Image (spheres, rainbow, N blue to C red):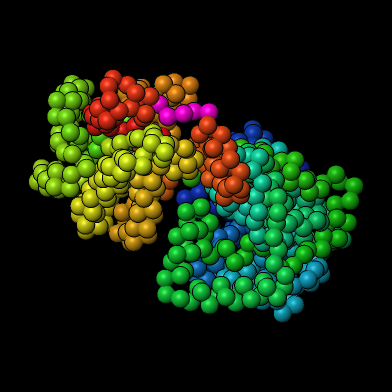
Amino acid sequence: MSYFVTGGTGFIGRNLIERLLEREGDIRVLVRPASLTRLDGLIARWGAGAAGRVRPVLGDLGEPLLGLDGEEVERLRGTVDHFFHLAAIYDMTASEQRNRRANVDGTREAVALANALEAGCFHHVSSIAAAGLYRGTFREDMFDEGQRLDHPYHRSKFESERIAREETRVPWRVYRPSIVVGDSRTGEMDKVDGPYYFFRLLKRTGGLLPEWLPLAGPELGDTNIVPVDYVAAAMDHIAHRPGLDGQAFHLASPRPQRSSEVLNIFAKAAHAPRIQLAVEPPPVAAALQKGALSALMRVPGARTVRRAVLNEVGIPDEVIEYIALTMRFDTSAAERALAGSGIAVPELADYAPKLWDWWERHLDPELHADRSLEGAVNGRTVLITGASSGIGRAAAIKIARAGGIPLLVARRADKLEELRSEIQAMGGSAYVYTADMSDPESVEAMVAQAFADHPAIDVVVNNAGRSIRRSVALSYDRFHDFERTVQLNYLGAVRLILLVLPHMRRRKRGHIVNVSSIGVQTNPPRFSAYVASKAALDAFTRVIASETIADRVTFTTIHMPLVRTPMIAPTKLYDAFPAISPDEAADLICDAIRSHPKVINTRLGRFAEVAYALNPKAVDQLLHLAYRLFPDSAAARGERGGPPEQATNEQLALARLTPGVHW
């Protein structure tokens, strides 16, 4: 037995060759010179027996007779029992020209070569894409049914199959695999495709939400997924069965899978929440929705927005409209041909964890992206407010160690100088700028001096803040608590942003990190002044972030949990609360600078937001219970160290000296 294989170094091709090696005979593999090394690696992987049996044949899809000269054609004439044509491109983002050159023109030359070699049988690997947007059940004996072929890939697979059917002068067989995923035994896959496009979204969802949280989502329709080892085994078996020439075989799952079912199977493997309510619009509503979407896409800029949204989760814009299949595939001929062989499509749920594990270890784009803090800050200036202690101080040290240049901002010059000396001692550099962030003139002078000293401010960390824990019952005559908190936490940060933003927009680069509070999500009693000031900054940031996208200026809001700093020490209640260290809080700031997420939340914060959205009255009752159980502190009541006003002022003075506490 002798075989000739195109596309033998591709995903399906190399799995097929593994099967052919279990039989007798030589295997000639068409390979470009540039791919010889890859074939050598595969031969080594296939074992010692492959070295003498797998023989490279230099050629190219774009050449007449695939690049074989007349002498070689004559030498091989009559010796090839099975000619497998797998070489093609499967890329939904590829242009019409690329699809035609590889899939259509390449197939024509493969057929011409098979005819010239007088091959025993020409095995053409087509695709269910040849069915285009046919509606209904597409049988294996169907081909040209007037189906819509809107996508270049669909057209190329249809035309290439037509060539195989009409121009082949030797016996032929056609195989139409459905969406091919990794090996069901090992999970191995070589590219992101099909359901893998959603893996990044699942990973992100699993990182943001608890696994047990039920979700609602749209039902996109049917899909059809098979593992590569099934496709290779079925193709090998059917190719060697007698009496099947002139037929097509759907190498697909006999049972179509709903998209929500598939997503839930992979969500389980990813430990992400699953869709409990899949909403499928009725046909009329779906048609209206599609019409409205098409009209929306014609609005200037709408497609750019869609591409930006899809790019964020790794889904190509070109494939989004072709995710769901419009037809079902009959697999009767393939099942008859495979009867008694033990070859069948395994259940996706049984091997999905292996697919996920392989993707996470080998294909996740995050594995190859430079997400290091060094890559984000090396040689760049990072202005940090509230840098003299706590979170700001810890963040400055981490940034300096990574090669960044922290611009240290706080009110106390002596503390800042101590920090600068420490950074210089470890081989870094830093600059000191004193400013009262609650004073607009002080902020303006500080920014002006920073720009005079440096050509750019690359990153701003709004970390300075004031926290006040006092019930509204004790605040009737303390309107200044709200004024002071807003002046620093909101207006001070906004003033700084407004001063640096024009510079960043001109340079088309910049990132601003706002250290907000988990309190914005949890609404804890007695923090009305503090939470309101942070919520105002959150809202301001959400609005302006949409205005600066084109200028490549981005924002991250960190809903910081309770941090163990000197500011919370006077409130003994906090001793019983879990809190992170300033070093851990600084890690969140570094994550924001490194990855530029829109927001950084804790699980508690996300849970609180969801709970309040679902049942705000119940949450109010729970918070009222906390209000009753945990009263105002002695400091808030003015009962420590003298008259109420004097004690409170001492606490405010302490707050001014130790900025950066966030709850």
Residue 435 in which image quadrant: top left
Q: Work out whether residue 558 can be spotted.
A: no
Residue 549 in which image quadrant: bottom left
Residue 54 in which image quadrant: top right
**Residue 242: percent from left, percent from top:** 86, 57
- Examine the residues drawn in magenta and state their main secondary structure: loop
Start-end of magenta stretch: 629-633
The structure residue drawn at horizontal position 64% and vertical position 43%, both measured from the top left corner, is 213
Q: Work out whether residue 212 can be spotted.
A: yes
**Residue 628: percent from left, percent from top:** 52, 31
- Residue 3 drawn above or below residue 288: above
Q: Farthest right residue?
A: 340
Q: Split into 4 quadrants, where in the image is the C terminus?
A: top left
The structure residue drawn at horizontal position 80% and vertical position 66%, both measured from the top left corner, is 140
* 12 on left or right of 39: right
- Residue 527 drawn above or below residue 318: above
The structure residue drawn at horizontal position 43% and vertical position 66%, both measured from the top left corner, is 304
Nearer to us in this view, 596 or 253: 596
Nearer to us in this view, 654 or 395: 654
**Residue 167: percent from left, percent from top:** 69, 73
Asked if the magenta segment contains residue 117, the reply would be no
Nearer to us in this view, 269 or 600: 600
The structure residue drawn at horizontal position 26% and vertical position 48%, both measured from the top left corner, is 491
Nearer to us in this view, 623 or 451: 623
**Residue 339: percent from left, percent from top:** 89, 51
